[in-house]
C-alpha cells in the first residue's frame, strides 16, 4: 500500500481498517540444551521489547498510510442485507465442482471396468 502511494504521488487508492490487536506468535527452533539458547532468547526478547523490528518495517514499508484508514464513525453508508441471490455465484461454483467430480468418478469407473475385461 505504501509503494502504491509512492507510485501514485501520495493518493489513497485503497482503504484499510483500523489495526487489529497483535495476537500472532513467534516460534523458532533451537537444539535442546544448546550453548547459545539463552543468548538467542535474550536477543530476540530485546528486539521485540524495544520494537526495533516493528519500527523498521513500519517506516520502510508502510509510508504514511494513516490517512487511508477508513473511519467507521464518519461512514453514513447503510449496509445492504445479504440475501440468497447474492450468494448464487458461490452455489454455482459448488455445483460445477460437484458435476466435474462426478464426471471424473464415472470415467474412472468405466476405465476400471474396461481394464478388468
Image (cartoon, grey):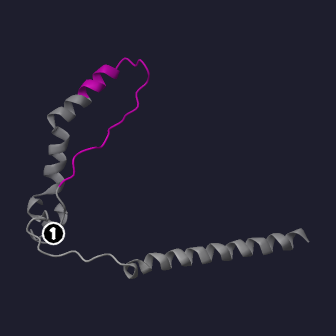
Q: Position of residue 96 (x, y in %)?
A: 55, 78
Snapshot quadrant of residue 77: bottom left
- Farthest-out residue, bottom: 85
Q: Residue 23 vs residue 52: left or right? A: right
SS type, badge 1: helix
Q: Which stretch did the figure color magenta?
A: 19-43
Residue name at image x 16 percent, y 72 percent: 13
Snapshot quadrant of residue 22: top left
Graded by Cα atoms within 10 Å as few (under 14), some (14 to 19) or many (20 or more), the crowding at tag 1 reads: few
Residue name at image x 63 percent, y 72 percent: 101
User: Does residue 52 belong to the magenta stretch?
Assistant: no
Numbered circles on residues, count: 1
Residue name at image x 35 percent, y 78 percent: 83
Of 116 and 95, the residue lying toward us = 95
Quadrant that contains the C terminus = bottom right
Of 5 and 72, the residue lying toward us = 72
Snapshot quadrant of residue 55: top left
Quadrant that contains the N terminus = bottom left
Q: Position of residue 30 (x, y in %)?
A: 40, 27
Of 30 and 82, the residue lying toward us = 82
Q: Label 1: which residue? A: 7
Q: Position of residue 94 (x, y in %)?
A: 52, 74
Q: Residue 46 vs residue 11: left or right? A: right
> What predominant SS class does the magenta segment belong to?
loop
User: Does residue 30 belong to the magenta stretch?
Assistant: yes
Amino acid at each position: 500500500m505504501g509503494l502504491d502511494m509512492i507510485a501514485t504521488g501520495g493518493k489513497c487508492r485503497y482503504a484499510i481498517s483500523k489495526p487489529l490487536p497483535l495476537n500472532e506468535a513467534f516460534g523458532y527452533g533451537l537444539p535442546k540444551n544448546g550453548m547459545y539458547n539463552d543468548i538467542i532468547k535474550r536477543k530476540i526478547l530485546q528486539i521485540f521489547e524495544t520494537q526495533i523490528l516493528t519500527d523498521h518495517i513500519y517506516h520502510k514499508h508502510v509510508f504514511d498510510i494513516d490517512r487511508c484508514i477508513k473511519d467507521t464513525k464518519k461512514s453514513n453508508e447503510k449496509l445492504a442485507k445479504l440475501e440468497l441471490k447474492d450468494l448464487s455465484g458461490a452455489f454455482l461454483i459448488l455445483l460445477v465442482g460437484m458435476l466435474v467430480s462426478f464426471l471424473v468418478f464415472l470415467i474412472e469407473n468405466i476405465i476400471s471396468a474396461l481394464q478388468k475385461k
